[in-house]
Structure formats: C-alpha cells, structure tokens
C-alpha cells in the first residue's frame, strides 16, 4: 500500500483575479501518508486544500486523485473545517450520518454508524445534542466523525484545532493519530503551528514561496505509536522543530 | 418565574393598559369630540352590542369567519407560492432574471390602486378579495425567501458537497434550513400585511367581514363601531403574530445560538 501515489500535483497554478497564488507547484502524497502543509498566513495553504477538495479548479497544470483529474468535490475526499461547519439544524447523530443519508442508506444503518462514530471520537451519549449545545472541542469531534463516517480515501483538514485551547488541542491531536492508525486514512493537514506539524506529520511541506512553486520538505521520524504524548519531548521532535523554525525565520528575513 | 420574566410580563401587560388609560382620560376630559375619538368604554359597548346583536343583521361570528377565511386562504396560498418563487429565484439565475422586472414593477403598487382593475378582471366576489391579499403576501414571501437562500455559509455548502450531497440534497438539507429563519420572519411580516389589506379588500363589495364593518360604520359616522372593528382586526394580528413567533422559536431553535 505504501508508495502508491494517491494524490499528485503537476505544475499546478492558481490565480485569483489574475494574481498568482500558486505557480508550478508539484508534489505528491502516498496512500496512507499524513502530509502537513505548513506556512505563514496567506501563503496559499487553504487554496491548495480547496484545489484537492475540488472546491476550486487549477488555472494551470493538473491535480490528480487516484490518477484522475480532480473536477468536483466528492465523498472520497472529506474536509474538516476550522469552523467545524456543522449543520446547526441537525443533531449530532444526523450530522454524523449525513453522508449515508445522501447516499440513501437505510435509517437503521445511519443510526448504527452515527453511534459507532460518536463513540470513536469520544462523543458517546451526545447523539441527540444539537451543535449549539456542544463545546468547541466537541464540535470539532463531530466534524471529524461525520467525515470518518463517509469512509473517505483522504481527509483534508484546514487548521481544525487552531481555535481550541492547548489541552483540548493536544488531546485531539493524539486522538486523531489514533484514529488514523485505526483507519489508515490518508490525511492532508494544514496548520501554521510548527509544533503541531512535527507532532502529526509523516512529512511536512514548508510552503516558503508557493507563488513560485517553492517549498521545503521534511521527513519526520518519531517512535511509534505516533500518538504517544512522550513524543513531544523526544530529542528528534525538538531538533526538527528547531530546524523548521530556523528555516521559516530565515525565509522571512530574506 | 425569574425576575427578568416577571418584569417582562409586567411591561407587556402594563403598556396596553397605560394606553387605554391615556385614551380614556383624553376622551372623558372633553379634549376631543366623541365622534372623532370615542372613549374606550364606547368602543367596548359597541363590541358588546355586536356580540349580542351582530352587525347589520349578521352575527359577529359570521363577519369574523368571513374575514378569517379570506385572510386564511390568501395567506396560505400566497405564502406557499411566494416562498416557492423566492426559493427558485434564489437558486436559479434564469428564473430570477425572468421574475425580476415584472415583480419589481408590481411590488410597489399599493393594493388600493389595484382595486379598480381587480373588480374589472375578477368581479366583486371572493376571488378578487383573496387575490388582492394573496398578491401582497406573495410579494413579501418572495423577497424574504430569496434573501434567505443566501444565508447558507460557504463552509456548510462545501461540507455537504464533499459528503456526497447532490444539488437537490444541498438545497434540501443546507440551503432550505439556512433560509428558514428569514422565511419565518417573512411569515410574520406577511401576516401583518395581509390583515392591513383586509379592510381594503373588503372595499371590493360584499356585506360580510370585519373590513366591511369598519367601512360601513365609518360611512355612517358610527365611530364606536369603527373602533370595535379595528380592535378586533388588531387582536387577530396580535394573536397570529404571537402564534407565529412561538412556532418560529420551535422550528428554528438554533437561531442566534451559535
Ligand atoms: N476569494 C478570494 N479572492 C481573492 N483572493 C483570495 C481569495 N481567497 C484567498 N485569496 C488570496 O489568496 C492567498 C492565499 O490564501 P489562502 O487562504 O490560501 O492562505 P492560507 O495560507 O490558508 O492563509 P491562512 O493561514 O491565513 O488561512 C492570500 O494572499 C489571499 O489574499
Ligand atoms: Mg487558510
């Protein structure tokens, strides 16, 4: 399984109003990999994610998923939004089962999957609650669960934990890595936190100048299981964090 | 009951009582002629008289029923079609383009201006009264429903798409629920509009209805009966608005709670 390319960007360019946001950007993602897109605000991380999701279309070059050009959003690529973007008019169970409902799955199955996924993300017993009755961390868990319920090949996550407090954020990072070990799902994770990037990623792309197709790449090797909190104190973790930090500052100074 | 709730209740009941008191004082101190502004007691006496003996030989309940039926039928059809048209305009640029000029030309015409035409086209029976009210309700609902279709957040729309929702499912599960708060507000505005046009619509002939009572009584300077009729229309407005507001709080329970 490892090594098979699930996503390929080939000289992808994207413009807003004739202004280059991305140019000649090429990279790929192997099946099962967790790739982190790291970079300062405005460097184009969300734009890349939107291109993969099919919300935007490349203005030049090609983006492929599974060897096919991305044309539209689809349930093979689930998105977790920073704002959670839950459906306020549906309870937790209906939010989670949304993809099954759209696919016309029977009610019994919808309920079963909702219960299973709620338990998986630590929300057992909250199935009947509405999103406005949940805390920020719980809302993100629902956002995660409803994407998992669709069994996507790939999860796209745009700073999903940025608005949370440190404890909740770290707990969710660890849970996400557990879920990822359990499902083997390929993940593209956007963040501007170096810590988060190093703790989560198998590989990090530091988008130094996406406008010109330039980025730095880091391979992360930390002890398995990756979700152990101890990894946050590991020598390799600290070293890589320092290196990325220096590279980022050097870019900004230049 | 909490302090805040008790305070609210006192103010809600107190303000109309205060208005009644001012009305009573102004009229009983000889500040205005009774034919221009009768005292509240006079209006209530007229109301009582109509309850017992009816108005112009017809029981009050029949007048009330005639008006409620007109407003009810016009409201249900006008609101259903208006909401449908507004949602369609919000979703289809083609349909929006087709509707734009005709509806914006018709919308500002006051209902009174349409009465001669409606008499010519639809006669002086129920049909023209219902159409006059229904048209106004339709316009209010179309504007509100169309505005509502733009309330859905981009992230919610995208989330639905990437969970496999079809165009119809995006509409049914995201666009429509997002539009509901605005649609509920529209329903309340439209009810007010419908009641305010009721009197005008009953200018279109006939001898039944609260509007008929108001118009007939005013042409004979029976001011107390004018007031009694107006108060009844007002009470219908109050009750229906409270009912709709209560329904809205239950239907769009998530509104303002994000
Ligand atoms: N709808 C839009 N119209 C025009 N320009 C846009 C639009 N959305 C984003 N941009 C521009 O595209 C560039 C990249 O935006 P993008 O949202 O991808 O950045 P980002 O890396 O996700 O930033 P952040 O970390 O702040 O979320 C920015 O310079 C921004 O000004
Ligand atoms: Mg962004």
Image: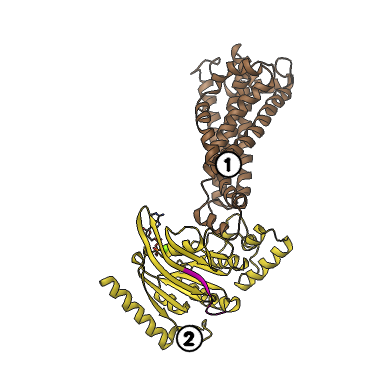
Chain colours: A yellow, B brown
Mark 1 Cα-neighbour bin, 10 Å: few <14, some 14–19, many ≥20 = many
Q: Read off the magenta span.
A: A1-8
Query: Position of B62 compared to A229: left or right?
Result: right
Q: Foreground: B239 or B182?
A: B182
Q: Do tag 2 and tag 1 residues touch (Cβ < 8 Å)? A: no
Q: Locate residue B54, reporting x and y percent.
A: 72, 19
> Which label is found at residue A230?
2
Q: Foreground: A191 or B45?
A: A191
Q: Locate residue B204, reporting x and y percent.
A: 63, 17
Residue at mark 1: C-beta within 8 A of ligand 1: no
Residue at 60 percent across and 38 percent down: it is: B83
Residue at 59 percent across and 32 percent down: it is: B138
Image quadrant assignment for residue A12:
bottom left
Tell whether position A7 is magenta. Answer: yes
Q: Foreground: B134 or A5?
A: A5
Residue at 74 percent across and 15 percent down: it is: B57
Q: Nearer the viewer, mark 2 or mark 1?
A: 1
Image quadrant assignment for residue A233:
bottom left
Image quadrant assignment for residue A217:
bottom left
> Which label is found at residue B87?
1
């Amino acid at each position: 399984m490892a090594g098979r390319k699930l996503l390929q960007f080939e000289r992808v360019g994207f413009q807003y109003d004739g202004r280059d946001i991305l140019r000649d950007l090429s990279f790929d993602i192997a099946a099962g990999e967790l790739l982190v897109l790291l970079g300062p605000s405005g460097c184009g991380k969300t734009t890349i994610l939107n291109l993969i999701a099919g919300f935007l279309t490349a203005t030049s070059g090609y983006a492929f998923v599974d060897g096919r050009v991305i044309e539209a959003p689809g349930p093979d690529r689930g998105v977790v939004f920073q704002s959670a973007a839950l459906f306020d008019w549906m309870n937790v169970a209906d939010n989670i089962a949304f993809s099954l409902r759209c696919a016309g799955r029977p009610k019994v199955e919808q309920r079963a999957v909702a219960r299973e996924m709620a338990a998986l993300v630590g929300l057992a017993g909250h199935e009947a609650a509405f999103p406005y009755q949940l805390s920020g961390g719980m809302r993100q868990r629902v956002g995660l669960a409803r994407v998992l319920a669709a069994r996507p090949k790939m999860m796209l996550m745009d700073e999903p934990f940025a608005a949370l407090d440190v404890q909740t954020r770290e707990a969710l990072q660890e849970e996400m890595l557990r879920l990822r070990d359990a499902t083997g799902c390929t993940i593209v994770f956007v963040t501007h936190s170096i810590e988060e990037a190093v703790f989560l990623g198998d590989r990090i792309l530091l988008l130094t100048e996406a406008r010109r197709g330039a980025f730095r790449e880091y391979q992360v090797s930390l002890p398995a299981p990756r979700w152990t909190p101890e990894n946050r104190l590991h020598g390799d973790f600290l070293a890589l964090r320092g290196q990325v930090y220096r590279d980022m500052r050097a870019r900004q100074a230049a | 009951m909490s302090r805040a709730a008790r305070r609210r209740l006192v103010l809600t009941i107190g303000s109309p009582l205060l208005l009644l008191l001012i009305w009573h004082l102004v009229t009983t101190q000889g500040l205005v002629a009774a034919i221009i502004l009768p005292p509240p007691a006079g209006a209530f006496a007229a109301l009582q008289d109509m309850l017992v003996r009816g108005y112009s030989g017809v029981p009050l309940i029949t007048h009330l029923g005639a008006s409620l039926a007109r407003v009810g039928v016009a409201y249900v059809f006008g609101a259903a079609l208006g909401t449908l048209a507004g949602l369609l305009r919000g979703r289809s640029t083609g349909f929006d383009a087709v509707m734009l000029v005709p509806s914006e030309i018709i919308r500002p015409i006051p209902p009174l201006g349409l009465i001669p035409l409606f008499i010519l086209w639809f006669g002086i029976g129920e049909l023209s009264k219902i159409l006059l009210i229904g048209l106004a309700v339709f316009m209010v609902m179309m504007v509100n429903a169309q505005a509502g279709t733009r309330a859905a957040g981009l992230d919610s729309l995208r989330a639905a798409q990437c969970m496999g929702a079809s165009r119809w499912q995006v509409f049914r599960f995201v666009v429509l629920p997002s539009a509901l708060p605005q649609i509920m507000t529209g329903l309340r505005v439209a009810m007010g509009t419908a009641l305010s046009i009721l009197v005008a619509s009953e200018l279109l002939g006939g001898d039944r209805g609260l509007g008929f009572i108001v118009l007939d009584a005013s042409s004979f300077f029976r001011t107390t009966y004018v007031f009694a009729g107006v108060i009844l229309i007002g009470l219908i407005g109050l009750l229906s608005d409270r009912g709709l507001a209560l329904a809205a709080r239950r239907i769009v329970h998530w509104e303002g709670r994000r």
